[in-house]
Image: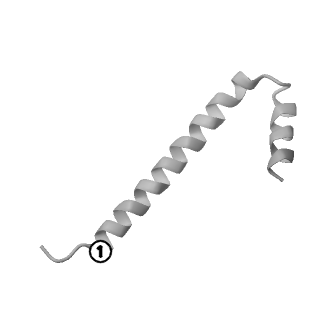
């Protein structure tokens, strides 16, 4: 499924991998933001009073 999605993306940008860099950057940002949200959520649930 991942290979098919990669093929569709490459065909959509006509093989220009430079056009895929912004999509990669957005994916990295979203992944980083979600992981940090999880860390903060875990920290708030696990910390004690004071």
Of all residues shown, which one is farthest toward the bottom?
49
Protein image colouring = one colour
The quadrant in which residue 47 appears is bottom left
Q: Is residue 31 left or right of residue 4?
A: left
Residue drawn at x 63%, y 36% as measured from the top left: 24
Of all residues shown, which one is farthest toward the left?
50
- Residue 16, compared with residue 41, is above or below; it is above
Coordinates of residue 49 in the picture (x, y in percent) = 16, 77
Q: Is residue 11 left or right of residue 18?
A: right
Front in this rendered view, residue 40 or 2 = 2
Q: Is residue 49 left or right of residue 14?
A: left
- Residue 33, compared with residue 20, is above or below; it is below
- Residue 25, compared with residue 3, is above or below; it is above
Local crowd size for mark 1, using a 10 Å CA cut-off: few (<14), some (14–19), many (≥20) = few
Coordinates of residue 12 in the picture (x, y in percent) = 84, 33
Residue drawn at x 53%, y 48% as measured from the top left: 30
Query: How many marks are shown on the rendered structure?
Result: 1
Q: Which residue is mark 1?
A: 46
- Residue 25, compared with residue 33, is above or below; it is above
Of all residues shown, which one is farthest toward the front?
3
Residue drawn at x 78%, y 22% as measured from the top left: 16
Residue drawn at x 64%, y 29% as measured from the top left: 21
Check the picture and name the quadrant holding the C terminus. Answer: bottom left
Coordinates of residue 33 in the picture (x, y in percent) = 46, 50
Coordinates of residue 35 in the picture (x, y in percent) = 46, 56
Give SS at disc 1: helix
């Amino acid at each position: 499924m991942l290979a098919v999605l990669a093929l569709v993306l490459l065909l959509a940008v006509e093989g220009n991998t430079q056009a895929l860099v912004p999509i990669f950057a957005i994916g990295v940002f979203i992944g980083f933001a979600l992981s940090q949200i999880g860390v903060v959520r875990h920290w708030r649930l696990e910390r004690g009073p004071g």
